[in-house]
Image (spheres, helix red, strand yellow):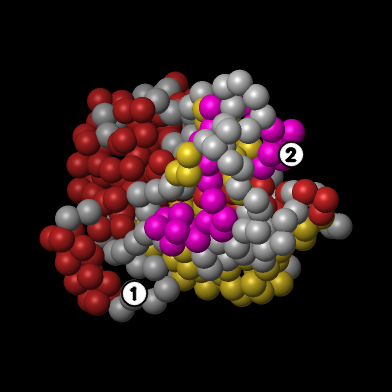
């Protein structure tokens, strides 16, 4: 986002009085006896993009559904604008397959009380930039997966929402469509919207202003990407060969090389251990992918595997 875009977004927010932050505080959601979210706090700031990351079943969709008003909270607080000022893309495409691209957008605009003239001016540039302009009269059900996702994001933006909630908008789409979707997301933030995106791509999350890491409905870490990376406890090593047996619960393979996390208090190995081709490896600086992996490992280690001081221990969110 350029300085001019940030300044324009600030002017929009000041003119409309929408500088308020949205989000959740100590949010819990239960479906019968199952706890989907357990005391989760999420901050959504105007003009900024926040990411929610986690594996399948982490609670990402439930959290975003609560923030958008589609899922009821069992406990805690949810702060969001009035429903007419929220844009929401669920985990599907969020569009009607038996309507054309133009009909989908016209219907969404009418639901939010946006005149056809205003909506037409707004979406024309978005459709042209994302390659959808030539598909205006095609049924949404006949579009590729990437085009449907882009249409869903445009539809969620058509009324210039104060809060834009997008549930995995780039999952399963091609690289060009991913870039187009992120262009739309940046446009929304530059216009002053608070944007929350769930994603399974940590390279995407690393671009955002804030990241929330979820696992099995619990908050493992929260903060800026830099804070989360800097808050990784202990040390991370890249090693040649396979990890030792005692290291295996704390090791994972990435890009063809094993990485081992040594929690605080663990005894780091010497320069040569275990046999031919295996040594203590070299200490490396974790990126966001490593930090999230360590957070998950720290929460899942069995008591017998734990070292004093181990655990997520990451900035702003370890529970």
Quarter of the image for residue 317 reads bottom right
Residue drawn at x 67%, y 63% as measured from the top left? 309
What is the number of callouts on the image? 2
Q: Name which of mark 1 and mark 2 comes first in the sequence.
A: 1
Q: Quadrant of the C terminus?
A: bottom right
In what element is the residue under mark 1? loop
Name the side, left or right, on which 36 lies relative to 141.
right
Q: Is residue 153 above or below residue 80?
A: above
Say which residue label 1 marks: 18
Name the side, left or right, on which 162 lies relative to 118.
right
Instruction: Tell which tag, 1 or 2, sits nearer the viewer.
Output: 2
- Expressed as whole percent of the image width and height from the top left, the position of residue 59 reads 65, 51
Which residue is at the front of the view, 180 or 52? 52
Residue 232: in magenta span: yes
Which residue is at the front of the view, 119 or 149? 149
Which residue is at the front of the view, 287 or 215? 287
Q: Is residue 159 above or below residue 130?
A: below
- Expressed as whole percent of the image width and height from the top left, the position of residue 19 reads 33, 75
- Expressed as whole percent of the image width and height from the top left, the position of residue 267 reads 65, 51
Which residue is at the front of the view, 67 or 225? 225
- Local packing at callout 2 (Cα closer than 10 Å; few below 14, some 14-19, many 20+) is few
Residue drawn at x 39%, y 76% as measured from the top left? 20
Residue 128: in magenta span: no
Residue drawn at x 48%, y 27% as measured from the top left? 255
Magenta part of the protein: which range?
Answer: 225-250
Quarter of the image for residue 55 reads top right
Residue drawn at x 35%, y 67% as measured from the top left? 46
- Expressed as whole percent of the image width and height from the top left, the position of residue 293 reads 58, 45
Q: Is residue 268 visible?
A: yes
In what element is the residue under mark 2? helix
Say which residue label 2 marks: 246
Which residue is farthest left?
4
């Amino acid at each position: 986002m350029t300085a001019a875009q940030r300044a324009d977004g600030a002017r929009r927010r000041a003119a409309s009085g929408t500088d308020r932050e949205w989000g959740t505080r100590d949010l819990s959601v239960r479906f019968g006896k199952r706890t989907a979210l357990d005391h989760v706090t999420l901050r959504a700031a105007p003009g900024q993009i926040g990411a929610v990351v986690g594996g399948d079943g982490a609670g990402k969709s439930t959290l975003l559904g609560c923030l958008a008003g589609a899922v009821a909270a069992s406990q805690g607080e949810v702060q969001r604008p009035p429903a007419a000022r929220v844009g929401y893309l669920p985990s599907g495409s969020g569009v009607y397959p038996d309507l054309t691209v133009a009909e989908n957008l016209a219907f969404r605009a009418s639901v939010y009380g946006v005149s056809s003239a205003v909506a037409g001016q707004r979406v024309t540039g978005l459709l042209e930039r994302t390659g959808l302009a030539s598909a205006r009269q095609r049924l949404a059900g006949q579009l590729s997966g990437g085009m449907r996702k882009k249409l869903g994001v445009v539809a969620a933006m058509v009324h210039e929402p104060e809060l834009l909630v997008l549930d995995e908008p780039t999952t399963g789409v091609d690289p060009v469509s991913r870039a187009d979707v992120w262009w739309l997301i940046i446009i929304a933030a530059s216009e002053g919207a608070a944007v929350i995106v769930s994603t399974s791509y940590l390279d995407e999350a690393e671009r955002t202003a804030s990241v929330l890491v979820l696992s099995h409905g619990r908050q493992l870490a929260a903060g800026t990407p830099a804070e989360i990376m800097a808050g990784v406890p202990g040390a991370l090593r890249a090693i040649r060969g396979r990890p030792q047996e005692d290291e295996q619960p704390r090791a994972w393979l990435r890009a063809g090389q094993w990485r081992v996390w040594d929690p605080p208090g663990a005894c780091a190995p010497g320069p040569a251990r275990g046999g031919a081709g295996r040594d203590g490896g070299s200490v490396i600086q974790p990126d966001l992918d490593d930090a999230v992996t360590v957070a998950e490992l720290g929460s899942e280690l069995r008591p017998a595997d734990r070292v004093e001081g181990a655990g997520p221990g990451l900035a702003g969110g370890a529970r």
